[in-house]
Image (cartoon, grey):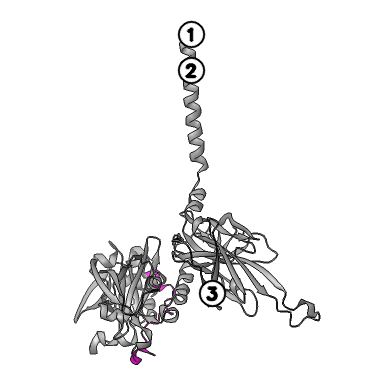
Amino acid sequence: MINRIFQLSLCAIVLTLSTLSAQAESVRETAVVKAIRRAQSAVANIHSEKTADDSGSLFSSNQGRKINGMGTGVIIDERGYIVTNHHVVDGVDSLRVTTFDGSAYTAHVVSFDRKHDLAVIKINPTRSLNVMPLGTSSDLMLGESVIAVGNAYGYENTMTTGIISQLSRDVEVNEKQSYRNLIQTDASINPGNSGGPLINLDGEVIGINVAIRAGAQRIGFAIPIDDARKIIAELLNVEKLSQTWHGLVATDVKSSGDRQLIVETTLPDSPAAKAGLQPGDVIVTAGSTKIADAADFERACLGKKPGESLKLSVQRTGEKQELAMTVGNAAERPASTFGTIVRANNSSDDGTNDTLYRMFGVRLSELASNERSLVGPRYRGGMRVIQVRDGGPAALNGIQQGDILVGLHLWESITFENVKYVIDHPQLNTFSPLKFYVLRGEETLWGHLPVGSFR
């Protein structure tokens, strides 16, 4: 009897120890561990060699001296396109990239933007690469935990953790280089980290590490990913890289739970226009590529030959549409499309769209100059409704994606400045409910939006 009890006790102890061991493993596997595990395979370690500029040296023996450099990149396309900082690849004679699995490749510079300090390089991998999970910088929080990944001092795949210390930092590096709207972090960023990702606890890239404060401790900076992706779209522009064209003009719309590419307009006689894309369409996929922004659309078109068809899946007023776009030859682009002002000038947005989305669940885009005819002779202009939040005040009161907002209360709505005047009006509460007028086709409709609870 005593032996039996002793055996049972031993079993209980073993089971208890096993349970504690399992619990210990689950405690060790923190959110940071999971985030790193998700993102690390899409980080590229960059090593460079360049010839020193010793033209001003008194010692001729220094001529042709080689300098080794290092940096980091983020894999943005499975075919080997990698984004990094321009200063990492500026003036280099050769580039070598090592991926997470230890594979080494020769790389070349595809395109760059010196002003915004971004560049795209290309390797020819032997297999399809993992692409960095895309986050958004539209909803970053002070104190939010972040992880910097990079080739710090040549120590490949170095991980450091910290928080977001501040947002919207403007940094002057020297007379030739300055940055705007940077993320400040206390995650350790060292030489070699440049061009690498700053990721959140979901393992998504939310910034591109770019600079440190010399002489300081744990003061580093990153380019917000939403800003970077707009530049990346330009760097991947197929008309520049592969002499094809599509003629799409679209807007990136990003928030914590919403990442969309919404059609503003299409160039006349362009492949996008002939495919049937319409203002307000949300492009969901292009070929096998899931579309979150313009950078995704450009890389979906990249590599396609003139005359090749690209299947598009779009959401139009809540319904799925399947379209086919035939990629055009840039050399045959109609002369009438050059110099055409097609993109709405939203530089005066200044946060107005974010306010509109918070208050009413709607985002707008100024009509391009070649769209003004859509409002006819009755109105001087209007603003395209490019997004409507499900269940928001705008949706509940009948506003639909694709509508053209032509008036608010007593005033016309042609520009963001017009709209800002209304929503910032000191007597806005007395307007409640706020009357709106939208043009849908040839019909003018009106309704009301609640104001008080959002002020």
Residue lying at 47% horizontally and 21% vertically, measured from the top left = 12
Secondary structure mostly taken by the magenta-highlighted segment of the chain = loop
Between discs 2 and 3, the one toward the N terminus: 2
Q: CA distance from mark 1 to mark 3?
A: 77 Å
**Magenta segment: does it hold 346?**
yes
Q: Secondary structure at mark 2?
A: helix
Graded by Cα atoms within 10 Å as few (under 14), some (14 to 19) or many (20 or more), the crowding at tag 3 reads some
Q: CA distance from mark 2 to mark 3?
A: 67 Å
First to last magenta residue range: 334-355
Query: Looking at the image, can residue 399 be seen?
Result: no
Residue lying at 46% horizontally and 68% vertically, measured from the top left = 226
**In the image, what residue type sits under mark 2?**
Ser
Q: Identify residue for label 2.
A: 9
Graded by Cα atoms within 10 Å as few (under 14), some (14 to 19) or many (20 or more), the crowding at tag 2 reads few
Q: Secondary structure at mark 1?
A: helix
Which label number is shown at residue 2? 1
